[in-house]
Amino acid sequence: MGTAHDPDHEVHSADLWRAVGTGLALVWGVVLLVVVGYALSLVRSPVDGDPPGFVRVLLAPVALVAVVLFVWVAVAGWRIHQRRPSGWDPVVVIGGLALTSGVFIATPWRFDGGPGKGLTPMSVGLVVLGVVSVVAGLLAQRSWRRAAEALEESHAGRALPGAGEDDRP
């Protein structure tokens, strides 16, 4: 049915993706904490040049959503560390949100030709980080499936080993 895979090679490959996933979860956690900090600083002590009052009020729900997403990403990072494929879901979803947000931010420049902000470091950063998250998440999930299949085909009868359960020297 399927081709035989070297279980050690497949598990090693999956472990490399685990490191990438843990790193991405950390990056998204920091980004979300920055969003929360920015929203709280604007709400608590506004200064001249800040957005109008109604925009600052709308930042309260944004901060709440960012806190919820932070918890989701923190749990995802732990799940990725524990070699659980479901840990990749938040990384892919938040990466997709960042990708669409970055494109949305740059949209006035691309379609209007007017004085919109266009491509800014923030919009480019969101697009790049979003693409990296989505692609890494999809490739990692594929790698983890292949590692599980290779272990199953080798008649080991077990899933990916948990963290610290490696039988390799």
Image (cartoon, rainbow, N blue to C red):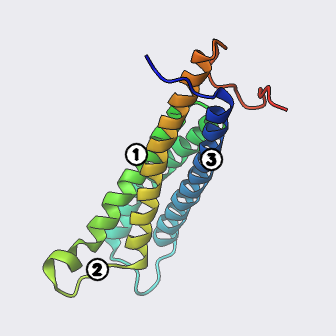
Q: Report how far apart the C-alphas of labels 1 and 2 lie in the structure.
A: 24 Å
Q: Which mark is residue 118?
A: 2
Q: Determine the residue positioned at 51% across, 57% down.
A: 32
Q: Earlier in the sequence, mark 1 or mark 3?
A: 3
Left or right: 69 in relation to 106: right
Find disc 3 in the rendering and name its residue: 22
Q: What is the distance, in whole Å, between disc 3 and disc 2 at their CAs?
A: 32 Å
Q: Secondary structure at mark 3?
A: helix
Relative vertical location of residue 134 with respect to residue 163 in this rendering, above or below: below
Amino acid bearing label 2: Gly
* Left/right of residue 41 with respect to residue 110 in the rendered view: right
Q: Please identify the quadrant where the C terminus is shown.
A: top right
Other-residue count near label 3 (Cα within 10 Å), few / some / many at <14 / 14–19 / ≥20:
many
- In which quarter of the view is residue 158 placed? top right
| Quadrant (top left, top right, bottom left, bottom right) of the N terminus | top left
Q: What's the residue at 31%, 58% (across, down)?
A: 100
Q: Is residue 114 visible?
A: yes
Q: What residue is pinned by disc 1?
A: 93
Instruction: Count neighbours of disc 2 (C-alpha within 10 A) and say few if under 14, some if 14 to 19, many if 20 or more.
Output: many
- Residue 71 lies, in percent from the top left, at 55, 43
Q: Residue at x 21, y 87 (%)?
A: 115
Disc 1, SS: helix
Q: How many marks?
A: 3
Q: Amino acid at mark 1?
A: Val
Residues at circles 3 and 2 in contact by the CB criterion of under 8 Å: no
